Amino acid sequence: MKKYLSIIILTLSLTINAQVPANYYDSAAGYTGYALKTQLRNIIASSHQPHSYNALYTAYATTDVDNYYENDGTLLDMYSEKPNGADAYNYTHNSNHCGNYSGEGDCFNREHIMPQSVFGSASPMQSDAISVVPSDGSVNGARSNYAFGEVGTATYTSTNGSKRGNNVTAGYSGTVFEPIDEFKGDIARIMFYFATR
């Protein structure tokens, strides 16, 4: 139990990219299963400060900075970052926001990891800086509102290898979107946060 709680606490703290205040998770101690999820939700809700949808662009200058792969301070976009090589294109913070685009590398916008159609564009999810991440406009459009999954035959592949195509995992055979392996854990943690939130 303690190991399970420790993993959840570590995951949430890394996801929100901030120092956890002392005693932050104390009210979740001793809980498991759905009761633990409820306690985590209460903790998040008690300290969450909603912001506007447009404020996300400002937040990205702090939350989504490439200080690891190229370490160049550009916008970190999970759908275009090439962890093992030079990126095909980069975006700078507070510029290159999408209006119209004709292909990859034109501009970036805000990607709802859990599509807005799932929650009806309701607040606070619509502008939550943890579950709405910056992404290339064209790749975001290709992802559309498809679920994440494991692609068999790709009908679309982005420059970093993210792809869209038929799902090969048992239980669903429709179209899915698959990010590259390096970011699957990030997306899974965001989805866990969203489900808990």
Image: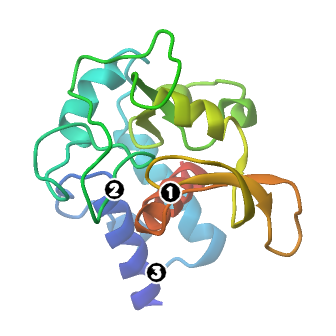
Quarter of the figure with residue 76: top left
Contact (CB < 8 A) between labels 2 and 3?
no
Query: Picture coordinates of residue 92 (x, y %)?
Result: 20, 27
Q: Secondary structure at mark 1?
A: loop
Which residue corresponds to the image point at 20% horizontal and 58% vertical from the top-left? 69
Quarter holding residue 191:
bottom right
**Earlier along the polypeptide chain: callout 2 or callout 1?**
2
Circles 2 and 1, Cβ within 8 Å, touching? The answer is: yes
Question: In the rendered view, would you say 188 is above or below 165?
Answer: below
Q: Which residue is mark 1?
A: 161
Image location of residue 41, percent across then percent down: 51, 53
Q: CA distance from mark 2 to mark 1?
A: 8 Å
Q: x and y percent of residue 174 in the render?
A: 87, 55
**Which badge, 2 or 3, is on the more N-terminal residue?**
3
Q: Amino acid at mark 1?
A: Gly
For marks 1 and 3, give the one nearer the viewer: 1
Give the x, y percent position of residue 176: 74, 53
Mark 1 in CB contact with mark 3 (< 8 angstroms): no
- Residue at which label 2 appears: 82
Could you tell me which residue is drawn at 61 percent across and 53 percent down?
163
Residue at the limit of the structure toward the top, as seen here:
99
* Amino acid type, callout 3: Gly
| Residue 19 occupies quadrant | bottom left
Crowding near pointer 2: few (<14 within 10 Å), some, many (20+)?
A: some
Label 3 neighbourhood size at 10 Å, few (<14), some (14-19), many (20+)?
few
When the figure is inspected, residue 12 is found, relative to residue 177, above or below; the finding is below
Residue where numbered disc 3 is placed: 30
Spatial separation of the CA atoms under disc 2 and disc 3 = 41 Å
Mark 1, other Cα within 10 Å: few <14 / some 14–19 / many ≥20: some
User: Which of 56 and 73 lies nearest the eye of the viewer?
Assistant: 73
Pick whichever of labels 1 and 3 is earlier in the sequence.
3
